[in-house]
Image: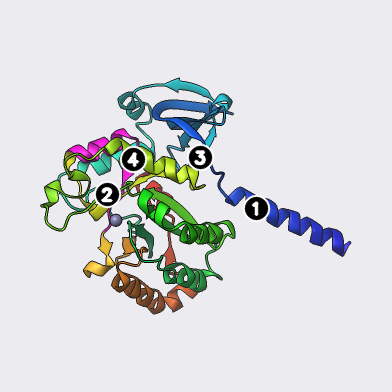
């Protein structure tokens, strides 16, 4: 009897690991934007991409209320393609559309546009860490520390990682390590698109820097990163973070036209900005900003007692954005 139980437990653990591990699509062709309502079993998803992989057609789907995403075979859905403008009307009442609109409303400033904070009524924060191109290894302290602090309280611990195409290419082992923590259920990663090249100049003014640099191929910066994510077995989320948090109005609208929600931050720790309840905190996971990571670790330590009482938690980015806009 005991043996059967052990056997069943092993099977169960393996299955959960398989469910958590994302499939890799290594032979993607015809990757493109594609907007359609996609219904299956009375559930309405919003398709934002379409691609082929080894003879099958897949779609990337967004749950307009929960902001979750998934990749599935197109053949399983009843698809009703529509231009993005029409889709925005169709999903008018959803958290998704409200978040897109809010990001567009905040598009005037050249720095830190988009959604900057989550649930102000909650105590705790949403942690985002950026993986811009870097010659340094991943700052693993972030992940081991949140796991240690929260393992009895919140498992897996949610974290949003803004990833670039170049970082994926530079750091395959660090990426495997992150995927393993995610598969083991120690952390739960929301993968945020942070552009492919993340070009930056020390001399150019902001209006010509980062993604605003003349000659930038925004199509590749967005879709190329998503394809690299899918090839590496990462599930693209519905979020986008501008390199350097720099954008202009036109660029914001380009990103929302891709169906993506720009995410800013109201607490970039290395710049001395203090996190408030509900803040979207920004640190760098790429080893380039140890000061911010140190600040975050001290913040965690200062909250040990509140964490133990579940009075200070880390929130899932999808949930923070979704609850901010639901019913509004
Ligand atoms: Zn960056």
- Structural distance between the alpha carbons of marks 2 and 4: 11 Å
Whether the magenta-drawn stretch holds residue 258 is answered as yes
- The stretch in magenta equals 250-265
Q: Which of these two is toward me, 265 or 34?
A: 34
Residue 190 locus on image (x, y percent): 44, 52
Counting every numbered tag in the picture gives 4
Q: Quadrant of the N terminus?
A: bottom right
**Residue at image mark 3:** 70
Q: Quadrant of residue 202?
A: bottom left
**Residue at image mark 1:** 16
Residue at x-position 17% and y-position 40%: 249
- Element on which disc 3 rests: strand
Q: Residues within 10 Å of mark 4 (few under 14, many from 20)?
A: many
Q: Is residue 232 left or right of residue 97?
A: right
N-terminal-most mark, 3 or 1: 1
Q: Residues within 10 Å of mark 2 (few under 14, many from 20)?
A: many
Q: Is label 3 or label 4 in front?
A: 4
In the current view of this chain or complex, which residue is farthest to the right? 1
- Element on which disc 4 rests: helix
- Structural distance between the alpha carbons of marks 2 and 1: 33 Å
- Structural distance between the alpha carbons of marks 4 and 1: 31 Å
Could one spot residue 274 in this view of the protein? no
- Structural distance between the alpha carbons of marks 3 and 2: 23 Å
């Amino acid at each position: 009897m005991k043996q059967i139980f052990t056997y069943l437990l092993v099977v169960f653990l393996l299955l959960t690991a398989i469910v958590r591990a994302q499939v890799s699509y290594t032979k993607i062709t015809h990757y493109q934007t594609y907007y359609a309502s996609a219904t299956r079993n009375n559930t309405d998803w919003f398709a934002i991409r379409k691609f082929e992989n080894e003879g099958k057609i897949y779609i990337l789907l967004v749950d307009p209320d929960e902001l979750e995403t998934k990749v599935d075979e197109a053949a399983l859905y009843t698809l009703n393609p529509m231009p993005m403008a029409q889709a925005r009307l169709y999903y008018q009442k959803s958290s998704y559309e409200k978040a897109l609109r809010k990001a567009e409303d905040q598009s005037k400033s050249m720095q830190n546009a988009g959604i900057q904070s989550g649930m102000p009524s909650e105590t705790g924060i949403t942690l985002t860490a950026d993986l811009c191109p870097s010659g340094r290894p991943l700052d693993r302290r972030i992940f081991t520390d949140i796991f240690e602090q929260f393992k009895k309280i919140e498992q897996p611990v949610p974290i949003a990682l803004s990833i670039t195409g170049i970082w994926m290419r530079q750091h395959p082992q660090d990426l495997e390590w992150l995927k393993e923590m995610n598969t083991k259920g120690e952390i739960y990663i929301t993968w945020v698109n942070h552009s492919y090249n993340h070009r930056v100049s020390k001399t150019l003014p902001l209006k010509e820097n980062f993604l605003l640099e003349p000659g930038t191929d925004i199509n590749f910066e967005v879709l190329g990163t998503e394809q690299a994510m899918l090839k590496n077995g990462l599930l693209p989320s519905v979020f986008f973070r501008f390199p350097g948090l720099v954008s202009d109005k036109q660029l914001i609208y380009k990103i929302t036209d891709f169906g993506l929600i720009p995410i800013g931050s109201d607490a970039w720790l290395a710049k001395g900005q203090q996190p408030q309840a509900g803040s979207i905190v920004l640190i760098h996971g790429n080893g380039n900003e140890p000061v911010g990571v140190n600040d975050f670790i001290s913040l965690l330590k200062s909250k040990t007692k509140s964490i133990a009482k579940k009075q200070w938690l880390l929130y899932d980015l999808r949930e923070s954005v979704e609850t901010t806009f639901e019913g509004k």
